[in-house]
Amino acid sequence: GALALAMVAAVASYTALAFLAGPVRGGACGAHGCVRGGSAARTVRRAGGGAAPDGDAYDYKPFLWALDLGISDGRIAEVLRVLPSIDAFWPASSGSLMREDFRRRVKELGAKDDGAIDTIFNTFNAGTFLATNREKVAEDVAAWRSSSGEVNAGALAGGIFGAKVSVIGAWLFLNVFSTFAAYFIIFRPILFTNFGIDLLEGQPRYWER
């Protein structure tokens, strides 16, 4: 019972982190299925760092992206200008869109800012690595421009906020809840039984019932 609950918490935590970060690139097949990839080496990119200079690297980290307040509307607008419609980056024949496929296609159109690219993609899918609702994304893309054709980066504000909440929530679950659950379910009875230590003095001791 207790051990099973702890294992469930651990698996759920790992799954949350993996789903945010996405599968490893390079054409391998793993828990999320077969991944299309270019070079076998994984590209390293810094989250929120904009376009990486030659010889430098950009490493997308979901939690660091969620905390980054430096990705301005101006940076986002520069990327939006090369995306006139959803067909520019998501073929109608594809049922889903992965983060790295989006990045590659957008860069082929001339965008360079990785931080802004990740920010836009995260509005498609609440911060996860895979977008699946093309119809909803198409509606969002249509809202990127005003009736006069001007780019409106502010239209992404709600989606960005929701994605940041989702990412931070997953991080808290992984780093706070699962740690507490491990102590409460596994280590608390061990510490109390063997050493008389209980960090939650006053709380019911379920193993004594």
Image (tube, helix red, strand yellow):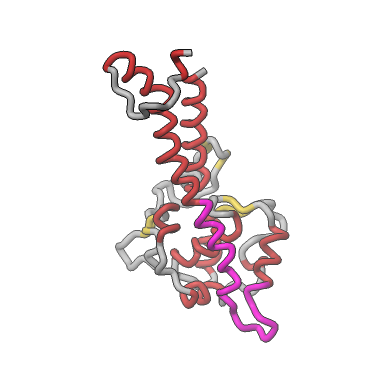
Is residue 83 in view from this perspective? yes
How many numbered marks, from 0 up?
Answer: 0
Q: Horizontally, is 18 left or right of 85 in the view?
A: left
Q: Is residue 159 magenta?
A: yes
Residue at image position (44%, 34%) is: 178
Whether 138 is drawn above or below 151: the answer is above
Whether 48 is drawn above or below 146: the answer is above
Is residue 100 in view from this perspective? no
Part of the protein shown in magenta: 143-166
Outermost residue toward the bottom in this view: 148
Whether 196 is drawn above or below 52: the answer is above
- Nearer to the camera, 182 or 43: 182
Residue at image position (44%, 30%) is: 181
Image x and y of residue 34, in percent: 56, 40
Image x and y of residue 36, in percent: 54, 47
Image x and y of residue 62, in percent: 45, 52
Q: Is residue 136 magenta?
A: no
Residue at image position (60%, 59%) is: 124
- Nearer to the camera, 11 or 58: 11
- Nearer to the camera, 3 or 206: 206
Q: Horizontally, is 97 left or right of 43 in the view?
A: right
